[in-house]
Image (cartoon, grey):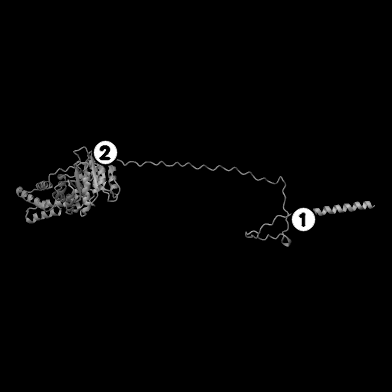
Amino acid sequence: MELILAVVIALVVAVAVTSGLVISGRKKKQLPPAEPPSTAPTITAPPAEPHVGEEAETPREEPRRTVEEVELPAEAAPEAPAPEAPVVEEPLVEEPLAPEIEVPEPTAGRLVRLRARLARSQNSLGKGLLTLLSREHLDEDTWEEIEETLLTADVGVAPTQELVDRLRERVKVLGTRTPDELRGLLREELVALLGDFDRSVKTESPEDTPGVVMVVGVNGTGKTTTTGKLARVLVADGKSVVLGAADTFRAAAADQLQTWGERVGAHTVRGPEGGDPASIAYDAVKEGIAEKADVVLIDTAGRLHTKTGLMDELGKVKRVVEKHGPLDEILLVLDATTGQNGLIQARVFAEVVDITGIVLTKLDGTAKGGIVVAVQRELGVPVKLVGLGEGPDDLAPFEPGAFVDALIGD
């Protein structure tokens, strides 16, 4: 009995010891350290909808479907492939077409073709003289009216007196004066007054170099345009031309001249705006020699005749060009509508460069035809070309007979 009691006590003690060890092990187990408090703002969720208590909804019975009744979702149709973007071909960049080369009108007889334009603006001179000469009695008053008519037409004092004296003598000797006789008489005297000059533009150089023509004149006379039209005249006569754009002070002057040249296939030598005109003129002649051109036309800057420095520079251009050879022509462009004022310009230019010929522009407008006589007498050089319109082929070689016929009519 005692033995059984001792066994029971031993068992109880063993169980107690074992329980203590388990409890002690559990107490020694360490929990993970607490996370530090977050600094992020606390987001408070909205209160949940009450679903308990009195506010809870009463559950509703829903019809249930069998497995057979449940329809599977239809398979999504395969997406159609995205249409390919059309291939856009880059447009080919075409090179600018060269301007079509024009064929200028022949110069022979050009003044005759333009006679109607000249006659419209000069009728007052020719018709007025014929009317006065047809009077039955040519007294002193009539001769004074004849003189006034000639002076009004810008013929000039000395040429007018010379013409009136010759007419008086011829009429006195002639006696009877029929309209045809008077017209023939007046025509002869006017042609004689215009003088017998060589009016061809010199483009034949004695040396193995191109003929060089320099065009000068004041601003506003149409000098650059005249240079371009002169290139057409020379091309029409079978010449090859190189243009020198030595007018570097007027905006777009070089562009204007180059456009004229491209129309007839003439190469234009140009430089920067405000560049040295003498250098460009020199290069133009050099280019003409390299291309074996027939003629080099040099357009100089339009200069006010009162600015001595600019006029001296024109002399420099002349000297530089002459290093290649002599200048064959120096043409002075005058606006015919300026009348006697044009003579002042002519005198100043003649002092700086040796003028060899005159180009009268705008002779078809309000110009007075007598300026042809006056400017020739002033400079002792001929009018070689006249401008009778704004068309590209309205620059014509001057022909005294055709000019007088246009003045006095048929």
Residue at the disc numbered 1 = 27
Q: In percent of the image, x 12 and y 55: which residue is there? A: 148
**96 or 212: nearer the eye?**
212
Could you tell me if residue 410 is visible in this image?
no
Residue reaching furthest to the bottom: 54
Could you tell me if residue 11 is visible in this image?
yes
Relative to 198, say whether 48 is above or below: below
- Mark 1 Cα shell of 10 Å, populated few (<14), some (14-19), many (≥20): few
Q: Secondary structure beneath disc 2? A: helix
Q: Position of residue 241 (x, y in %)?
A: 25, 41
Q: Amino acid at mark 2?
A: Ala
Instruction: Please identify the quarter of the rendering in which residue 265 is found.
Output: top left
Q: In percent of the image, x 6 and y 56: which residue is there? A: 140
Q: Position of residue 116 (x, y in %)?
A: 20, 47
**244 or 198: nearer the eye?**
244
Residue at the disc numbered 2 = 290
Of callouts 1 and 2, the N-terminal one: 1
Q: Amino acid at mark 1?
A: Lys
Q: Position of residue 351 (x, y in %)?
A: 17, 50
Mark 1 or 2: the one toward you: 1
Determine which of the numbered discs, if any, sits on residue 298 in the image: none
User: Total of numbered circles in the picture?
Assistant: 2
- Mark 2 Cα shell of 10 Å, populated few (<14), some (14-19), many (≥20): few
Q: In percent of the image, x 90 and y 52: which residue is there? A: 8
Residue reaching furthest to the right: 1
Q: Secondary structure beneath disc 1? A: helix
**406 or 156: nearer the eye?**
156
